[in-house]
Image (tube, rainbow, N blue to C red):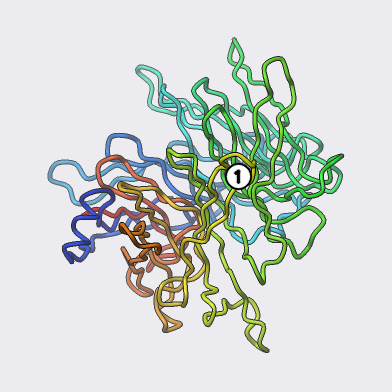
Amino acid sequence: MLAAKLAFSLGMGAALLAASQAGAHPKQMDIYTFSGGRPIGGVLPDGQGGVYGMQNDTSGGFGAVYHLTPPGAGQTEWAGTTLYGFSGGADGNLNGVNNGTDFYKIPAPFANELVSDSSGALYGETPSGGANGFGTVFKLTPPASGQTGWVETVLYSFAGQADGATPYGGLVVDHRGVLFGTTIAGGVSDGYGTVFRLTPNAGGTWSHNVLHRFGHAAGKTIDGSVPFGDLVLGAGGVLYGTTQKIAGDNRGSGVVFQFTPPASGGADWSETILLAAPNHDKLGHMARGLALDANGIIYGNLGRTALDTRAGRAHRCRRSVGGCGAVFTLTPPASDHTWTFTTIYQFPDFDTGRYACGGVLPGPHGVLYGVTQSGGDQRKRGSVGNIYRLTPPAAGASSWTESEVYRFRPHYEGRFPSCSRLSHDGNDSLYGTTSDAEGGTGAVFEIKQ
């Protein structure tokens, strides 16, 4: 399933910042390319220089969880190991989605990331398969002493009814080991999706609870539908996330939502819509993925902020008004309970990037890193995406500054970065994946100065 070689290198954190300010250019190294399947979502650093991830499989398999480790002494290539290969049955399927769900609504391939706990176990989702065919949440346990194989356990199989169908956005784990996630379908009769919780019990069992079913709840004037982005866990156990659509509004382009745990003795979580994008021609198409800083400020992406409506140009971003995507903030309310929406940067044209997606990764000194899925070159053939950096305004200034960290090249390496948030290992390395590659079907990359 895995072919050889990993990564670009250019650097995250202070080293990358200092080098870019000094005018240094990134070195190009090899990439790790896949054959027979594509990487799904981003990667999870293992704390020892390697990364975990998932891939689908177009050559007869049903996807796998992999581990990439850096070259050892005297070696030059990264090593790829398959930790678990799915059978497509009760254990899950990473390749597709049950026909009973509205997968046609999703703008990008299934893309989520693994999470881990303090024991080194990995947790993830499959969008289909399981006991009922509507997806699973699974756990991979590291080999016991004297063993070599990881053990897969299905924690929950979705029934495709009120419990939800097609887990899609990835998981988040809290300090108690409780898992939270979303499904893009199921829940109410219209199938708008759910937010769910999985709680570990004594004896190794898990309890599934639906915290919210998206749709027209009593007393609500607006709600989201198709929660396709990963959740973010904030202070006090508050959850934040995005949806692709607004329930019942075909032109709606999604919401940013907040779920607050019940007060002591209560049972129900409360939902607050922080931002609604009712018309994608004006505000923008909500992209998956949020980030939260230490001050409680939310950062997110709008994939396209203005569409070109001229004949023959449908779905192209309107470059004359900076319509190729944006990065925004939502600032917590001071006293009036209203969050403040601010566009901190709009991508003006193909050269700076098109379709900012996957959220941003906060770095040192308030710097943000992210990807555009295409663009990066005014020439159509060279528009295969880039990695960008946004630097906060200097003292006395008001504008954020965008700079290009890396421009993917169409006929040389991985290209079209996945709509997943970049990750870092704490040692000035930044990781991500691409959905295509020269001589392969996708790649994992590392940026290191």
Residue 439 higher or lower than 81, as above or below: below
Q: Is residue 3 left or right of residue 274?
A: left
Circle 1 packing at 10 Å, graded few (<14), some (14-19), many (20+), is many
Task: Measuring from the top left, give residue 333's x and y in whole percent.
Answer: 58, 42
Taking the spot 52% from the left edge, 22% from the top edge, the residue there is 177
Residue that mark 1 sits on: 241
The amino acid type of the residue labelled 1 equals Gly
How many numbered badges does the structure rendering display? 1
From the viewer's side, name the closer residue of 439 and 126. 126
Q: Is residue 55 left or right of residue 75?
A: right
Q: Residue furthest bottom?
A: 311
Q: Residue furthest left?
A: 74
Task: Measuring from the top left, give residue 449's x and y in whole percent.
Answer: 20, 55
Instruction: Kindly state the secondary structure of the residue where label 1 is placed.
Output: strand
Taking the spot 45% from the left edge, 39% from the top edge, the residue there is 295
From the viewer's side, name the closer residue of 340 and 375. 340
Residue 156 higher or lower than 55, as above or below: above
From the viewer's side, name the closer residue of 201 and 23. 23
- Name which quarter of the figure residue 230 lies in: top right
Task: Measuring from the top left, give residue 104's x and y in whole percent.
Answer: 72, 60
From the viewer's side, name the closer residue of 332 and 410. 332
Taking the spot 49% from the left edge, 29% from the top edge, the residue there is 140
Q: Is residue 25 left or right of residue 355?
A: left
Task: Measuring from the top left, give residue 413's x and y in whole percent.
Answer: 34, 66
